[in-house]
Amino acid sequence: MGTLSRRADIGVGVKSRDMFTTRLGVIFATLGSAVGLGNIWKFPFLTGQNGGAAFVVVYILSTLVVGLPVMIAEQTIGRAARADAVGTLKKLAPNSAWWLVNLLGILSAFFIMAFYTEVAGWVFAYIFKAAGGSILSSDPAVTSAAFTSLVTSPVQSLIWQWVALALVGAIIMLGVSKGIERVTKTLMPVLFGILVIVCIRSVTLPGASEGLTFLVKPDFSKLTWSTVLTAMGLSFFKLSVGMGTMTTYGSYFHEDQNIPATATRVMLSDLLVSMLCGVAIFPAVFAFGFEPAAGPQLLFVTIPAVFSAMPLGRFLMPLFFVLAGIAATGAMLSLYEVPVAFLVGSCGWDRKKATLVTLIALALVGSTAALSSSTLADFKLFGMTMFDLFDYVTSALFLPIGGLFLCLFVGWRWGSAEIKKALSNGGKLDNQLVVTAFTGVVKVVTPALVLIVLLTGLGII
Ligand code: PHE
C-alpha cells in the first residue's frame, strides 16, 4: 500500500504527520534506535569491567522485565496520542503534571547526545585511522597513545563531534520517512552482515574459548547492588527507553502495527546484536592475552590492538568501525528526533528551524563533554567530568526515573481499559493473554523492581 493511502486511512488530524511507511520500516527504525554504541561500546566494556557472564545474566533479566514493558508502554501511548513525547502526556492526561515526566526525557536526550556524539565522533575518526593504518599496532601502549592524542586535542574532539552532529542533523532534516526510515532500512542489514563476519573471525582464533567462557559462565559472587543498577541502567539505555524516544517513534507507527510483537522482536534482535558484539570481542581479547576490564577505552585501545594482532585484522578493523558508525547513527537519529518532534509538535516550529536550533544547542552542551579530556579535564561536578556526569546521570538516574513514572502513568492513570484497546488495536488482535500480562507487569512488577534497584543501587536503602 502506498504512503498516501496508508496515511489517509489513519484519520483526520494525522494526515499531515510524516510517518513510517511500512511495518518493516518501523522495525528497522526502532531497532536502529536500540542498536548503537550501547551494544558495541558500552555492553562489552561494562561486561568486561563487571566480571562477565553474571553481569550479562542480570542485564538480560532487566531487559525482559523492565526494558521491554517500558518500550511497549511508550510506543503504545505515542501511537494513541500521535504527538511528541511531551504532547502525548498532555493529550492523554490534560490538566495534570504528567507531561513533566517526558520533559525530563527531553533533558535526558540532550545529555545523552552530549556524550554520545563525542563517542560517535571518535568512531568516525577511527574509520579513517583504521583504513589509513595509523592505529595498526598490537602494542596497547601504541594504540593508547593514538587514542590519547585524539581525545586530548580540543580541536579534533570538537570537529569530530560536529561531524557526527552535522550528519544526523542532515538526515533529520529530510524527515521521518525519507530520512530516518530510509537510512536505517538500508544500513541495519549491512551492520548485521559485518558483525557476523567479525564474529566468525574471532571465534576461529586459537584460544578463543576462554573469552566465550567469560561471556557465558556466570560467577555471581562478583555481583553487587551497584552492579545491578548499572545493568538495569544499561537495559534502559540499550532499548532507548525512559526518555520519550519510543513514544516519539510510536507516534509514527501505523494503526495496525502489532506493538507487543514489534517491541519483542526489537528487544530480541538488540540482545542478539549485543551478544554477537561480545562474541566478536571477548574471544579475541582473551586469545591475545589482553585485559577485558579496560573500561570505556576497550573499543578504542584494546580492540585496535586485537585486530592488529589477528590474521586479516587489517581489513576487518575499518569494517568494524564502519559497523560502529552505522549503529551510532541510527541511535543518534532517534535521540535527535525527540527535541525536534517536541519543537515541531508542541511549539509549532517548522522542522528545519527545529533541526537547526537543536543542532546549535547540542553543539553547545556537547562541547562540554567533548572537551572533558582536554580543556575541561579539571572541571568536575560531583567528582566527575562532564562526559562522565552526563553518562552516569542519564543511565543511573534519569532513564530509570522516567521509566518508573511512565509505567505508573500507563498502569494507573491511563488504565487497563485504554491499555486493552490500544494493545489489541481496537479489538482487531486476539492477544488477551499478552494484554493481561502486560497490564500486571506495568502496574506493579516493573515499577517495584525499578524502585528497589534504584534505591539500593544508590545506597539509599
Ligand atoms: N539505544 C542506544 C544505544 O544503545 C542509545 C540510546 C539511548 C538511543 C536512549 C536513544 C535513546 O546505543
Image (cartoon, rainbow, N blue to C red):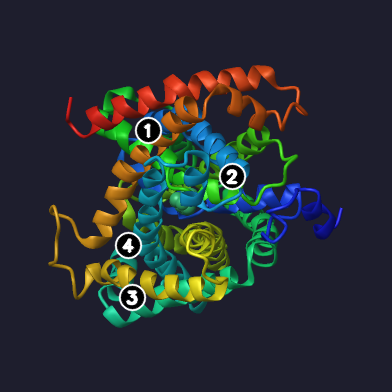
State the residue at coordinates (57%, 18%): 437
Point out the tag, 4 or 2, that comes first from the N-terminus: 2
Q: Residues within 10 Å of mark 1 (few under 14, many from 20)?
A: many
Amino acid type at image mark 2: Ala
Task: Look at mark 1 in the image and give the residue it sits on.
Answer: 55
Amino acid type at image mark 4: Pro
Residue extending farthest to the front is 95
Distance from disc 3 to disc 4, alpha carbons, whole Å, reads 21 Å
Point out the tag, 3 or 4, that comes first from the N-terminus: 4
Distance from disc 3 to disc 1, alpha carbons, whole Å, reads 32 Å
The x, y position of residue 337, in whole percent, is 52, 60
**Which mark, by number, is residue 259?**
none
Amino acid type at image mark 3: Ser
- Of residues 242 and 143, the one nearer the viewer is 242
Mark in front: 2 vs 3 = 2
Residue 42 horizontal side relative to residue 249, left or right: left
Are circles 3 and 1 on residues that touch, CB within 8 Å?
no
The x, y position of residue 126, in whole percent, is 45, 71
Task: Look at mark 3 in the image and give the residue it sits on.
Answer: 157
Mark in front: 3 vs 4 = 3
Task: Look at mark 4 in the image and give the residue it sits on.
Answer: 140
